[in-house]
Image (cartoon, rainbow, N blue to C red):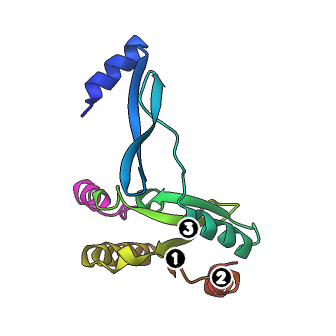
């Protein structure tokens, strides 16, 4: 494992890290080396796809359903959309906010003028059927209900433009 201290020293020294990693592939049931990937930069990071294929597909349909009249942000932290009531004393407010700091929603639909959340969207795949995931989803539902922000859930495999329009229509102004 690479420590943060190592990465920081590497960055500070502008040292060029050149590490080769073999890429393995399976061909006819046999694992073979395909090629070498070489990192030649100060830190060993590579660009990745921001959205999964199913998220990207839904994102495009959602934009069309909204007629491009709202902003749609993806992978938004719950704590950037709602927070604990400021009437709470500082310490309990801090503790309540800690529960939502590392949670995200798949999409947040924002009003173009005020940038206030109109509603949020969660795409549910089979992983949402697991007990621990259901508990997290229930908590997230209650957080948004408490804040007055509708949370809409769509099955990742069964939606179309018409069904999305029907489900979001009551929340649009």
For residue 8, above or below residue 151: above
Could you tell me how far apart the alpha carbons at marks 3 and 2 are, in whole angstroms?
Answer: 13 Å
Name the disc covering residue 156, or none.
1
Q: Position of residue 171 (x, y in %)?
A: 62, 81
Mark 2 neighbour class, 10 Å CA radius: few under 14, some 14 to 19, many 20 or more: few
Mark 1 neighbour class, 10 Å CA radius: few under 14, some 14 to 19, many 20 or more: some
For residue 22, above or below residue 156: above
Name the disc covering residue 132, or none.
none
Q: Residue at x 66, y 72 (%)?
A: 62
Q: Reply yes or no: does residue 34 show up in magenta.
A: no
Could you tell me how far apart the alpha carbons at marks 2 and 1 are, in whole angstroms?
Answer: 10 Å
Q: Quadrant of residue 165?
A: bottom right
- How many marks can you see? 3
Name the disc covering residue 160, or none.
2
- Of mark 3 and mark 2, the one earlier in the sequence is 3
Magenta region: 82-97
Of the 4 image quadrants, the one containing the C terminus is bottom right
Mark 3 neighbour class, 10 Å CA radius: few under 14, some 14 to 19, many 20 or more: few
Task: Name the one closer to the observer, 49 or 136.
Answer: 49
Of the 4 image quadrants, the one containing the N terminus is top left
Q: Which residue is mark 3?
A: 54
Left or right of 102? Residue 121 is right
- Of mark 3 and mark 1, the one earlier in the sequence is 3
- Disc 3, SS: helix
**Circle 3/circle 1 CB separation < 8 Å:** yes
Q: Residue at x 39, y 24 (%)?
A: 19
């Amino acid at each position: 494992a690479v420590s943060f201290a190592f990465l920081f020293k590497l960055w500070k020294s502008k040292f060029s890290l050149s590490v080769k990693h073999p890429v393995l592939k399976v061909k006819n049931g046999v694992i073979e080396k395909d090629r070498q990937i070489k990192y030649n930069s100060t830190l060993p990071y590579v660009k990745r796809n921001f959205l999964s294929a199913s998220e990207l597909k839904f994102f495009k349909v959602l934009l069309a359903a909204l007629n491009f009249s709202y902003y749609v942000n993806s992978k938004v932290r719950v704590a950037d959309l709602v927070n604990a009531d400021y009437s709470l004393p500082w310490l309990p407010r801090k503790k309540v906010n800690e529960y939502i700091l590392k949670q995200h929603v798949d999409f947040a639909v924002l009003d173009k003028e005020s940038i206030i959340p109109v509603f949020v969207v969660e795409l549910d795949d089979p992983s949402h059927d697991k007990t621990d995931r259901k508990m997290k989803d229930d908590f997230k539902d209650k957080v948004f209900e408490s804040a007055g922000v509708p949370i809409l859930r769509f099955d990742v495999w069964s939606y179309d433009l018409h069904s999305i329009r029907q489900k979001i229509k009551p929340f649009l102004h």
